[in-house]
Image: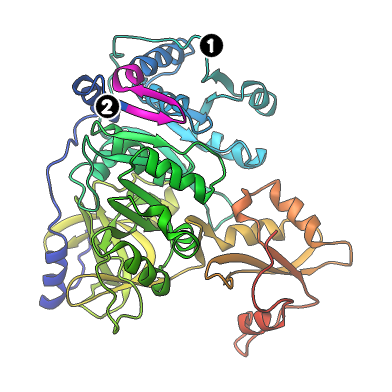
Amino acid sequence: MESLATTAEALSVHQEINRTSVPFPDEAGVNELFEDCAARHVDAVAVVHRDRKLTYGELNELANGLADVLRTRGVLPGDTVGVCVERSPELIVGLLAVLKCGAAYLPFDASWPDERLRTLFGDARCRRVLTDRNEALSARFPECEVVPAVYAEPPRGRTNPVVPVRSHDVAYINFTSGSTGKPKGVPIQHHAIARLVFGAVYARLDAHARLLQLAPVSFDAATFEIWGALLHGGTCVLYPGKNLRLSELKRVLDEHRVTVLFLTTALFNTVVIEAPETLGGLDTLLTGGEEHSLKHMAKALQHYGRDRLVSVYGPTECTTFATFHPVRELRPEDPALPIGRPIQNTRLYVVDGEKLCAPGETGEVLLAGAGLSPGYLGMPGITRQRFIDRDVAGRPERLYRTGDRAYLRADGDLVFQGRQDDQVKISGFRIELGEVAHHIRSHPTVKQSYVMATELATGEKALVAFVVPHGEDLTPEGLRTHLRTRLPGYMVPSAIHLRASLPLTATGKVDRRVLLSSRPGTTGVTPL
């Protein structure tokens, strides 16, 4: 095993920030942890959705009943079950039922293109789908067995299934954008979920916690929102609508006395500017997914005070959150908001080449600890590139290379400095510009293309594409239609500009500055 070179100064600051080890239940599956919790909190409210409430006892019985149905359909330990259910109690029942079978759940959105979903199902070896859209999905994917998630008389079971589930078994699979044009499957193990929500240093998670479930279940923030409540005896409050309205958000937060909320950076900025009173009743407001605007954070500090805001950071490969930074002040000398220190049972290293960085030196952020994924599904080459083994001052570590650049301040806080590659985050979704460009180039009338992220007048980011067509038949709307059959909506560029050629710099690279200055509407991108 190779060793990282280090100095006394670099080693000292890393040893200080990486004292994060705390006890957590790392030998049990999430299903067992939930069942133990349900036995202790039988009559406590587990899930709230509109005017419906399920106690822990009711939720456990419904999940047992659905697990029996899945097992009679042939679901075995180690299988993968697709889950496509609207945000509802049935969604939570379904996730638990899959785990009670010893299987992993693969959450997906029915609006994603068929071609992309078939790729996901194939990579994850998913042959069954649990859904509330039985006929529609049966017609689209006849190769998959469709299992109903909603019943007029839901099956119940008083006895928990006796299924062997180990803590290192896969609990769920998220897919992220891939630079090669193919999404990457990221399996997450049971013990990684336990590491995220037990002994949490970034928010109070206990039987009194009430968490809002707002994120799409295919987005890894949902892992925190659901299991942060249901493994502690707290309440998971399901946001009632598909589309967010700030007036509705305020009503739900106030009516159900939500204590902890996570918002993506873009949504946080919108709420802070348009309706800051929406979040006034929270104990803890977590926000992350993109680099924070100091202007928006200053307004939030002024409105909410210094003991309620927490910035969080983490890639999917490290199970939702990896670092946290309680925002108590904004120092005039700081050019950016720190992303903080590692959360419990997580370690981070800033590395330049094969050398551990001292404070102030910029390098790549490498993560270690119980939250790491075992690797990408069916991609051994990329797994070897991103997950590496190194010796750090006598300590063997399995490390995930994030591709994020940062430096440590003298006090140990991590400050983000951008990406090493062309990956961007927009509204919390991770997007590889190379994947978008790959699908643009696959159009038969596209000669050249260049995709970038640009900043809107509101401070949010958007994708924009510049395309050199073959002939005169290509239109922006025609290209969007092509992309919508291959990519989720959030990966389709907000604006597509057709050009006779792409300007180049003296070194032969595409000149971003010239492109941006010459596009129509230089003050921002016109949304679809």
Residue extending farthest to the right is: 472
Q: Position of residue 386 (x, y in %)?
A: 38, 57
Looking at the image, residue 196 lies above or below residue 135: below
Q: Is residue 219 visible?
A: no
Q: Quadrant of the N terminus?
A: bottom left
Q: Nearer the viewer, residue 67 or 91?
A: 91
In this image, 9 relative to 384: left or right? left
Q: Quadrant of the C terminus?
A: bottom right
- Residue 152 numbered mark, or none: 1
In this image, 20 relative to 227: left or right? left
Residue under label 2, please give it.
34
Marks 1 and 2 sit apart, C-alpha to C-alpha, by 25 Å
At label 1, the amino acid type is Ala
Q: What secondary structure is found at the residue carrying circle 2?
A: helix
Looking at the image, residue 97 lies above or below residue 265: above
Residue extending farthest to the bottom is: 506
At label 2, the amino acid type is Phe
- Magenta span of residues: 46-60
Q: Nearer the viewer, residue 414 or 42?
A: 42
Q: Nearer the viewer, residue 24 or 151?
A: 151
Is 51 within the magenta?
A: yes
The mark nearer the N terminus, 1 or 2, is 2
Is 285 within the magenta?
A: no
Q: What secondary structure is found at the residue carrying circle 1?
A: loop
Q: Is residue 250 visible?
A: yes
Q: Position of residue 319 (x, y in %)?
A: 34, 47
- Residue 143 numbered mark, or none: none
Q: Position of residue 462 (x, y in %)?
A: 59, 65
